[in-house]
Image: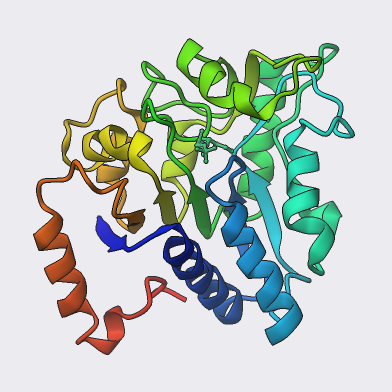
């Protein structure tokens, strides 16, 4: 795991944007795995800026989102499709027919929909770079604690903590969905590169469990310890419970001395 600790959320987002820019510049038809939630909003803002100011083009990019609420109309402002349109897709030159979310409505079979999503990812030759946020309970995607570490795209019931954490995003008259389709942990583990961002004090315990805890279904993100190419970008608050902070800072300083380690994406 490469752990990078930066001063604040702004630095985390712009550093993450550098990785995405590097990938898109190296492989203009890359397959991106995308996340929603508060954490990636500024990353997407930075990508829009890079598109407008530096002609970063998403024309040939395909994308697969981690998750989508069960049985939600894509037009619903709370759908993750709406989130992606609003925060990224409507502001760059991506072809929306190449953007995918794991949808399932009440007339569809969630198992069949999960298999279709997995097949679509395979048909695109897998995900090059998966962007992740981190739940305060250690979830990635909506793989809540106790999720199988070998899970695939499927339907999950959200935990009470996740429902409470996300209730801030719903107005009193809006119904908050309790189930979602999500990529599984095994699906995420097959991405060639993983970039996880976490910011704020409320993520500090989950960050510690993810990086230094045992690999356990109780902290689904801890499975990333088994991935070959992961970069974790944290702000100081999210890193505050880590005992090895000095080592991570030292390792990052050393890395910058070796030009080949400047970029994460050495296989492209
Ligand atoms: C969203 C997702 C979730 C979030 C996580 C953190 O697509 O997969 O795992 O990344 O719940 O959410 P925020 O960023 O709102 O704290």
Residue 231: x and y in percent read 34, 58
234 is higher (above) or lower (below) than 215: below
Location of residue 38 in the rendering, given as x and y in whole percent from the top left corner: 57, 43
Left or right: 62 in relation to 253: right
Which residue is located at x 36 percent, y 30 percent? 138
101 and 165: which is toward the camera = 165
Given residues 221 and 151, the one toward you in this image is 221
Say whether residue 194 is left or right of residue 227: right
Q: For residue 227, say whether it is visible.
A: yes
In the current view of this chain or complex, which residue is farthest to the front? Answer: 172
On screen, residue 266 versus residue 209, left or right, reads: right
- What colour scheme has been applied to the protein in the rendered image? rainbow
Q: Position of residue 120 (x, y in %)?
A: 69, 43
Residue depicted at x 25% and y 25%? 216
Residue drawn at the location 84% of the way across and 58% of the way down: 90
Residue 90 vertical placement versus 111 (above, below): below
Please give left or right for residue 262 compared with residue 173 in the image: left
Q: Is residue 94 visible?
A: no
The image quadrant where one finds the N terminus is bottom left
């Amino acid at each position: 795991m490469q752990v990078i600790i930066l001063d604040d959320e702004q630095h985390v987002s712009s550093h993450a944007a550098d990785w995405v820019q590097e990938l898109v510049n190296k492989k203009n038809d890359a397959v991106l795995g995308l996340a929603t939630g508060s954490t990636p909003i500024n990353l997407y803002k930075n990508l829009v800026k890079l598109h407008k100011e530096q002609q970063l083009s998403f024309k040939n990019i395909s994308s697969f989102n981690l998750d989508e609420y069960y049985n939600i109309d894509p037009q619903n402002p709370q759908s993750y499709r709406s989130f992606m349109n609003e925060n990224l897709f409507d502001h760059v030159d991506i072809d929306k027919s190449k953007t995918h979310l794991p949808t399932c409505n009440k007339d569809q079979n969630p198992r069949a929909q999960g298999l279709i999503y997995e097949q679509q990812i395979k048909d695109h030759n897998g995900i090059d770079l998966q962007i992740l946020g981190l739940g305060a309970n250690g979830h990635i995607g909506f793989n809540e604690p106790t999720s199988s570490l070998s899970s695939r795209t499927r339907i999950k019931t959200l935990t009470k903590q996740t429902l409470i954490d996300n209730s801030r995003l719903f107005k009193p008259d809006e119904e908050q969905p309790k189930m979602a389709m999500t990529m599984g942990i095994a699906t995420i583990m097959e991405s060639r590169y993983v970039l996880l961002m976490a910011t704020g004090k409320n993520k500090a315990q989950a960050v510690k469990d993810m990086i230094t805890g045992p690999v356990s279904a109780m902290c689904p993100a801890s499975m990333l310890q088994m991935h070959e190419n992961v970069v974790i970008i944290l702000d100081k608050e999210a890193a505050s419970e880590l005992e090895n902070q000095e080592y991570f800072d030292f390792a990052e300083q050393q890395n910058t001395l070796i030009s080949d380690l400047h970029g994460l994406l050495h296989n492209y």
